[in-house]
Amino acid sequence: MNILVTGGAGYIGSHTVLSLLNNDFDVIVFDNLSNSSIESIRRVEKLTDKKVTFVKGDIQDKAALAELFCAHNIDAVIHFAALKAVGESSTMPLAYYQNNVNGSLCLLEVMATFKVKHFIFSSSATVYGGDNNVPYIETMPLGEASSPYGASKVMVERMLNDVAKADSDFRAISLRYFNPIGAHESGQIGEAPQGVPNNLLPYIAQVAVGKRKSLQVFGDDYQTLDGTCERDYLHVMDLAEGHVAALKWLNKQRGFTGVEAFNLGTGKALSVLSIIRAFEQVSQQNIRYEIGARRSGDLAAFWANADKANRLLGWQATRSLEQMIEDTWRWQVNNPEGYL
Ligand code: NAD
Ligand code: UFG
């Protein structure tokens, strides 16, 4: 089967491409490399000893997409390509709606022209918003997104539902990721943020390796056990395998039409301070940190009820926190400048 992976050179995309190749899918990556490097794909090819067809392009370029669908017999699309910095989305909302919403719209239009009906979407726990209780479960309504980034994910989920209502052959899955961290165990591919990392783990890793002086912990006055925010961290390879499980399920379900959402998380939440301590233990480095103000838009704690993915997809996160941190650390030490 030929799988088109948009954004496949990025962090989660590259790990998923590796899992797809290891499961004998043929992969075509379409990426504009705005937040990634072709080197990730080269390394995936080396690790798997398989070839990836790479096309550089933007999902808003419908002519380029049409050319791609013409040249390859695409069976399904996994759609990662998006801008993903929550804070940045509040300062440049239009860029987020343009890239994430209009980009998805362009992709779905070209898919419709070429009658490609299977779609897997990178959604996020952020679609539950602040009003739902934790743990989040798929039967909850979509919430009031706390950022334009989150709103863009909610909008695409809504768009998929409407497309499915209008076309009974269309089948889609929204995978709602919790907090992916870690790297492939080889230390060859991982998360390579450009500039100052927004997310916790890449920031801690850069402090541990001496690239940054100290971490700001965003608030210690939340209603949690140690006062810092709690999140459901899962290994990026578990997440990658979740995509393979979702794709296999989509291919098998003869009777299913419409859109199905699945949470991908471990079902456990860990605080910022407990992550720092675990990182210190694994890396044997002292992580300097100071307690700063709360970051706007952060929720105190959220984690997944991931029973549905287990029940229907046969998927569950299996890798431990220690493994997540060991793999982050190996990647960071081997590649202090990312893919440069
Ligand atoms: P990433 O930035 O590493 O990967 C995104 C990729 O998409 C990059 O390679 C980028 O170059 C590409 N891209 C962006 N806009 C494009 C466009 N218009 N045309 C073609 N390519 C484009 O991010 P990631 O962490 O791998 O995230 C992948 C997906 O998962 C995103 O949709 C993100 O919103 C979603 N997600 C990520 C997280 C997380 O914590 N990393 C959590 C929930 C959801
Ligand atoms: N944090 C710090 N200091 C930092 C960075 C983060 O204390 O320098 C804290 C945050 O306040 C939060 C926790 O670490 O409590 C995790 O923060 P991240 O930025 O790593 O992750 P978020 O939970 O904010 O968001 C991530 C993705 C979103 C996605 C969400 C749910 O970035 O795209 O998980 O899946 F929507």
Image (cartoon, grey):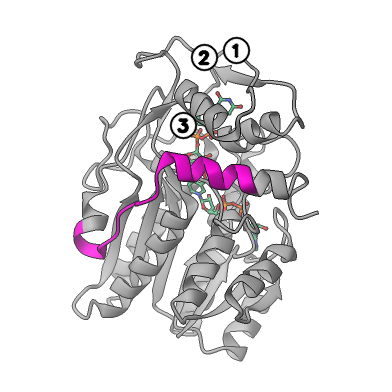
Q: Is mark 2 on a helix, strand or loop?
A: loop
State which tag comes first along the sequence, 1 or 3.
Answer: 3
Which of the two residues, 283 or 171, is positioned nearer the viewer here? Answer: 283
Q: Residue at x 40, y 22 (%)?
A: 300
| Separation of residues labelled 1 and 3 (CA atoms) | 21 Å
- Is mark 2 in CB contact (under 8 Å) with mark 1? yes
Q: Residue furthest front?
A: 284
Ligand 1: quadrant of the figure: bottom right
Amino acid on which disc 2 is placed: Gly
- Seen in the picture, residue 169 relative to 231 is either above or below; the reply is below
Which of the two residues, 227 or 125, is positioned nearer the viewer here? Answer: 227
The residue to which callout 2 is attached is: 219
State which tag comes first along the sequence, 3 or 2.
Answer: 3
Amino acid on which disc 1 is placed: Gly
Q: Which residue is drawn at 54% across and 43% down?
A: 326
Decide if ligand 2 comes within 8 Å of the CB at mark 1: yes
- Seen in the picture, residue 185 relative to 267 is either above or below; the reply is below
- Seen in the picture, residue 216 relative to 340 is either above or below; the reply is above
Label drawn at residue 292: 1
Question: What's drawn in magenta, residue-wise?
Answer: 311-330
Q: Residue 95's spot in the image, x, y percent?
A: 66, 47
Q: What element carries label 3?
A: loop
**Residue 52 is drawn in which quadrant?**
bottom right
Decide if ligand 2 comes within 8 Å of the CB at mark 2: yes
Amino acid on which disc 3 is placed: Ser
